[in-house]
Amino acid sequence: MRVQRITTKTRSPKETKILDCALKLLIEKGDAGLTLRKLAEYSDMRLSNVQYYFASREDVIAAMVARYFNNCAENLLNQTKNSTAKTKREKVAFLVSAGLAHGQEISDMCRAFREIWAISSRSTVIDECLMDYYRRFADVMASFVFEDTINAEGGDRLATILVPYFEGYSIVARSLPRNVEDVAALLTDLIVDFEA
């Protein structure tokens, strides 16, 4: 299994500042609140400066989403590299715990994804970024669990269970009757037994 990288171009400090502010604005004000004028104010720049780097709102959103997803995937990849999990069960348990971590509160990550999902329903570019991110997320998980063996079927099965579960769990976790530790143990057992 090969981990794909979402390519993002190297950005200048001003572009990075604009994209960071765009993400904060998206999280705080939502999709409708992310206008170039508001972004310029939020970035403490003139509108013409923002437009110099990004010609349109769509250009800002596309660059912000690609950068954000790349950072999310890199974060997961770094977590797996720093993990002390050795066995398949330990690795699955590690992934499950990492994936469920955002479900107990409405985190900035949950807010960002909610807004990006909404934008993706109207933009094929953002939808493509979203699908690329989930494929990369699935590849990272499969590579982590099956690092020494090429087991495409196992990786596909793992991703098919975990990716949608994590997304749904982040929405409904606070209403479920079990705590996160119980859910993690249950899901780990299910996956390991399913793969056996």
Image (cartoon, grey):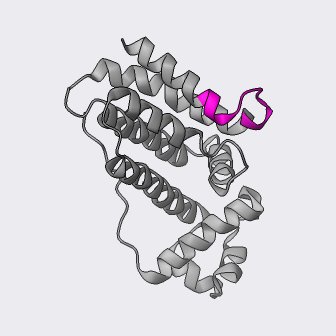
Give residue 113's position: percent from left, percent from top.
62, 48
Q: Where 32 falls versus 88 (above or below)?
A: below
Determine whether, in the image, residue 43 is placed left or right of residue 12.
right
Q: Residue at x 58, y 67 (%)?
A: 56
Camera-side residue of 43 and 70 = 70
Q: Residue at x 62, y 34 (%)?
A: 181
Q: Residue at x 56, y 85 (%)?
A: 49
Q: Is residue 55 visible?
A: no
Secondary structure mainly formed by the magenta segment = helix
Camera-side residue of 75 and 85 = 85
Q: Where 54 falls versus 45 (above or below)?
A: above
Determine whether, in the image, residue 36 is placed left or right of residue 89.
right
Give residue 67's position: percent from left, percent from top.
46, 60
Magenta residues, as a range? 173-183
Question: Does residue 158 show up magenta in the picture?
Answer: no
Indicate the quadrant where residue 120 lies: top right
